[in-house]
């Protein structure tokens, strides 16, 4: 229905420009369609699951830049046959490894960053990606 606010606006009523066509369905068809849509929505929500990512590494001590690791992202079940992982935790020196779809995780390449988690369906085993090595930065005093 298309509405326009016109002179009747003072009375709080819009003017009807075009009414929507009426749709008539028998009650049993309407209820059947609603139940099918509900069943599909419930099945989809049951398939979409999430698992928490791992905690970030503990904070270093004694340096000029002391920071803990960022937690890993959540794993996601996208459908009955597809799961995905999130990127690995970032470090002060760059982002973590990219997430994957139904495979082993990717190892990190930026100093101190985390590898991505593996993603799998059922009982298939996959390994998560390795975190990268740290780095020591030495600035010469001048």
Image (cartoon, helix red, strand yellow):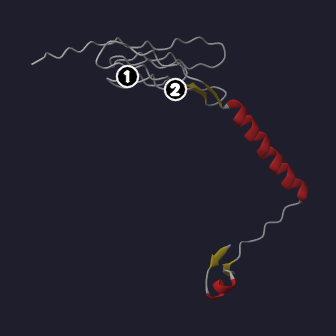
Q: Nearer the N terminus, badge 2 or badge 1? A: 2
Q: Nearer the viewer, mark 2 or mark 1?
A: 1
* Residue beneath the point at 77% across and 46% down: 37
Residues 13 and 128: in front is: 13
* Residue beneath the point at 63% across and 25% down: 81
Whole-percent x, y for residue 136 in the image: 26, 12
Quickly name the residue at label 1.
Answer: 91
Tell me the element at label 2.
Answer: loop
Image height of 126 relative to 3, above or below: above
**Mark 2 crowd level (few <14, some 14–19, many ≥20, 10 Å Cα):** some
Question: Picture quarter containing residue 68?
Answer: top left
- Hey, which residue is sitting farthest left in the picture? 142
* Residue beneath the point at 61% across and 81% down: 5
Question: Picture quarter containing residue 26?
Answer: bottom right
Q: CA distance from mark 2 to mark 1?
A: 14 Å
Residues 67 and 52: in front is: 67
Whole-percent x, y for residue 92 in the image: 34, 24
Q: Is residue 79 left or right of residue 90?
A: right
Of the 4 image quadrants, the one containing the C terminus is top left
Question: Picture quarter containing residue 24?
Answer: bottom right
Image height of 31 relative to 98, above or below: below
Q: Is residue 139 left or right of residue 28?
A: left
Quickly name the residue at label 2.
Answer: 73
Image height of 38 relative to 130, above or below: below
Whole-percent x, y for residue 78 in the image: 61, 31
Residues 116 and 112: in front is: 112
């Amino acid at each position: 229905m298309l509405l326009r606010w016109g002179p009747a606006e003072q009375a709080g009523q819009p003017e009807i420009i075009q009414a929507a066509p009426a749709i008539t369905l028998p009650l049993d068809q309407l209820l059947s369609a609603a139940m099918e849509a509900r069943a599909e929505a419930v099945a989809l929500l049951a398939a979409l699951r999430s698992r928490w990512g791992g905690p970030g590494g503990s904070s270093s001590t004694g340096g000029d830049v002391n920071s803990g690791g960022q937690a890993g992202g959540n794993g996601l079940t996208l459908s009955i046959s597809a799961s995905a992982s999130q990127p690995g935790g970032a470090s002060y020196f760059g982002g973590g490894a990219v997430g994957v779809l139904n495979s082993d995780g990717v190892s990190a390449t930026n100093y101190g960053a985390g590898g991505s988690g593996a993603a799998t369906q059922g009982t298939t085993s996959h390994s998560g990606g390795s975190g990268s090595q740290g780095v020591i930065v030495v600035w010469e005093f001048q």
